[in-house]
């Protein structure tokens, strides 16, 4: 098992280097004039020349790649074309709100997806099971950005229950001092004990979180269901049942435990999906995260910013997959 | 081989086909999905022929009739330029299906030969190709497509290319798995023994025998690819105005949808319906063609 984990970590590092190499190719090799692209469409010849030297484009490719790697490890991703700020500095302010959103929707996926999957496995081929199946196929087929607009239409325009977007009400922002410790607003307001801000933030979080959680809910429910269906047929479950243990206990304690490996793998994968789905959703809800950041960057072709978000998301995805694989490998029944 | 022998040798295949057809008929959801796909394909072929004027969409603009509610004349209402949303949604079918097919086709062209080569030769070459696919799969889906499309320049052709580049590793994996087991089979060994070059074995024996699983995977992917194209267009990286592309329509509707719900709801429903139908069909096909579930 130790060997497997070491091998897996090495593979993770290789994939990471590969991802960096691909981003290097995208930024430096594919464009016909990378320097001009890097400084933006309105740059003067002088600026382009400066960028050529700055990016090392006058040097051979392997030297360029070395410099690219060095810059990366020093946390230098270049300056945003739009705001002229260092991309790393901007990412630091944009990442926490996105993490908060992804975290919240993953929790939604767990507390809705697992019971849904469990109950539809228990009552196979009954209405709930059919609903679950339809829901999971439907959730994969829904365009997230459209769901966002649709929910806004219902809950803001027609029912006037929830706010249209943003992280906090402007009035609350003016009346109270917004705490800033970790950048995670819900968490910070709890530390402060400011429940007005907490509930307002929660209200603003609800629509975007529901929008991006549909996909993981469907995925988790479906995978939990199929894993449980296999487990239910096993002898130890039959034994537990024949002892006369309560069905709830059997399912929630004995069966579910063994399906968690599958659920964790799926969750890790779906966090990656969720992260990228925020790219389509955040801008709609004016949520100040990396999703909005990359959406504006794409519109203004702000290449350093696009690259920064791409690298961050890919790294997060690789690490998540690594963690999931290691957790699964820690299971003594898995022999690798 | 005379004719009766030929018929005899074809019989098992024919029987298998009949069983598949029977299973398809029994599976109501899959059957409905199949009808849905046929309907979409018909719309994609026929509508652009029936509405040739709409090819020059700016002639359709009619500012006096902008943002009208759905009515008998305009079942899906009109948009901000007074164009009929229903007509545009129908026209969008061809764009979505066509681009998705081309993108998946390109991904197959890259992925299938690579997988066959990796599986057939094995060893070092296999290791390199598979680590390469690992790297591409190291990106979350859609992210690589966004990055590539923005660097290539925002238009529909580049969006297709971007999707193909981020999608091929899946096919490589499948085909490689097939090739690894196929190369131990008698007929491949026989072909090798009579001196067929590897190129011939790969293209004449290995790839044709991978067709079934690849088709199933591709049919399951079409839905996801249509969704990705819509997402790229929504971000401004795919189709450009005035193309009647669904994702682009939802994107432009953002400025008006609070007072004109029909403008964003109907194109979105079109995406949902199309993707759902393809996903259901792919799911059903897998169930029918998979020997494990076939027995039941």
Image: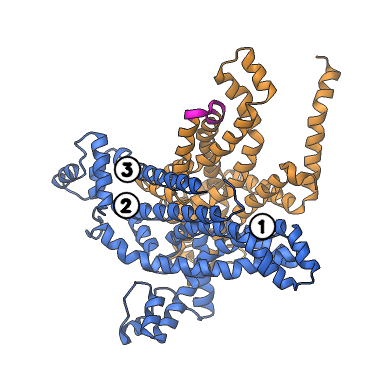
Chain colours: A blue, B orange
Q: Residue at x 48, y 79 (%)?
A: A162
Cα distance in 3D space between marks 1 and 2:
44 Å
Closer to the camera, A206 or B80?
A206
In magenta segment, residue B124? yes
| A47 relative to A246, above or below | above
Discs 2 and 3 carry the same chain letter: yes
Magenta segment range?
B117-125
Q: Which residue is mark 2?
A: A301
Q: Are marks 1 and 2 in contact (CB under 8 Å)?
A: no
Q: Which residue is mark 3?
A: A24
| A141 relative to B213, above or below | below
- The residue mark sitting in front, 1 or 2, is 1
Q: Secondary structure at mark 1?
A: helix
Sequence-earlier tag: 2 or 3: 3
Q: Which residue is mark 1?
A: A227
Discs 1 and 3 carry the same chain letter: yes
Q: Secondary structure at mark 2?
A: loop
Mark 2, residues whose alpha carbon is within 10 Å: few (<14), some, or many (≥20)? many
| B211 relative to B253, above or below | above
Closer to the camera, A184 or B227?
A184
Sequence-earlier tag: 1 or 3: 3
Q: Quadrant of residue A181?
A: bottom left
Residue A118: horizontal and vertical position, in percent? 67, 66
Q: Chain of mark 2?
A: A
**In the orientation shown, which residue stands out farthest toward the top?**
B194
């Amino acid at each position: 098992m130790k060997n497997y984990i070491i091998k897996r970590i090495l593979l993770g590092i290789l994939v990471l280097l590969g991802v960096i190499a691909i981003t290097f190719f995208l930024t430096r090799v594919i464009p016909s004039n990378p320097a001009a692209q890097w400084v933006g469409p309105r740059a003067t010849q002088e600026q382009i020349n400066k960028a050529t030297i700055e990016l090392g484009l006058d040097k051979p490719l392997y030297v360029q790649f070395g410099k690219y790697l060095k810059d990366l490890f020093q946390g230098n991703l270049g300056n945003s074309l739009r705001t002229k700020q260092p991309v790393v500095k901007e990412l630091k302010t944009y990442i926490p709100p996105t993490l908060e959103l992804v975290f919240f929707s993953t929790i939604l996926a767990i507390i809705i997806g697992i019971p849904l999957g469990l109950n539809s496995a228990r009552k196979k081929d009954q209405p709930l099971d059919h609903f679950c199946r339809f829901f999971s196929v439907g959730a994969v087929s829904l365009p997230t950005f459209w769901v966002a607009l649709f929910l806004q239409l219902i809950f803001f325009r027609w029912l006037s229950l929830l706010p249209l977007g943003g992280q906090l009400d402007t009035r609350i922002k003016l009346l109270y001092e917004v705490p800033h410790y970790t950048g995670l607003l819900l968490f910070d307001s709890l530390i402060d004990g400011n429940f007005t801000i907490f509930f307002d933030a929660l209200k603003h979080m609800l629509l975007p979180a529901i929008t991006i959680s549909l996909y993981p809910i469907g995925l988790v429910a479906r995978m939990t269901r199929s894993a449980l269906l296999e487990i239910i047929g096993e002898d130890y479950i039959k034994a537990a049942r024949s002892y006369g243990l309560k069905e709830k206990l059997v399912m929630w304690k004995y069966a579910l435990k063994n399906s968690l490996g599958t659920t964790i793998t799926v969750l890790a994968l779906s966090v990656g999906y969720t992260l990228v789905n925020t790219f389509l959703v955040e801008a709609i809800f004016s949520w100040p995260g990396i999703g909005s950041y990359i959406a504006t960057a794409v519109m203004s072709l702000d290449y350093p910013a696009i690259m920064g978000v791409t690298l961050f998301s890919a790294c997060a995805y690789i690490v998540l997959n690594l963690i999931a694989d290691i957790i699964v490998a820690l299971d003594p029944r898995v022999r690798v | 081989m005379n004719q009766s022998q030929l018929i005899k040798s074809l019989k098992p295949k024919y029987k298998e086909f009949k069983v598949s057809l029977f299973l398809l008929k029994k599976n109501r959801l899959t059957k409905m999905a199949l009808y849905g796909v046929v309907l979409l394909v018909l719309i994609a072929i026929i509508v652009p022929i029936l509405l040739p004027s709409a090819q020059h969409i700016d002639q359709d603009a009619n500012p006096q009739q902008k943002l009208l509610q759905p009515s008998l004349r305009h079942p899906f209402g009109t948009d901000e330029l007074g164009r009929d949303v229903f007509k545009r949604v129908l026209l969008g079918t061809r764009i979505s299906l066509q681009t998705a097919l081309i993108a998946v086709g390109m991904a197959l062209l890259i992925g299938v030969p690579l997988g066959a080569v990796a599986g057939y030769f094995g060893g070092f070459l296999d290791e390199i190709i598979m680590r390469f696919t690992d790297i591409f799969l190291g990106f979350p889906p859609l992210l690589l497509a966004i990055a590539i499309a923005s660097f290539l320049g925002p238009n529909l052709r580049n969006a297709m290319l971007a999707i193909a580049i981020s999608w091929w590793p899946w096919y490589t994996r499948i085909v490689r798995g097939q090739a690894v087991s196929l190369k131990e089979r008698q007929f491949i060994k026989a072909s090798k023994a009579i001196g067929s070059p590897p190129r011939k074995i790969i293209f004449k024996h290995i790839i044709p025998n991978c067709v079934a699983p690849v088709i199933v995977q591709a049919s399951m992917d079409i839905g996801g690819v249509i969704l990705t194209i819509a997402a790229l267009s929504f971000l401004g990286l795919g189709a450009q105005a005035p193309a009647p592309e669904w994702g682009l329509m939802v994107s432009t509707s953002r400025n008006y949808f609070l007072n004109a719900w029909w403008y964003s709801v109907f194109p979105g429903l079109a995406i949902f319906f199309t993707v759902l139908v393809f996903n259901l069909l792919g799911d059903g096909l897998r169930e029918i063609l998979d020997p494990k579930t076939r027995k039941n």
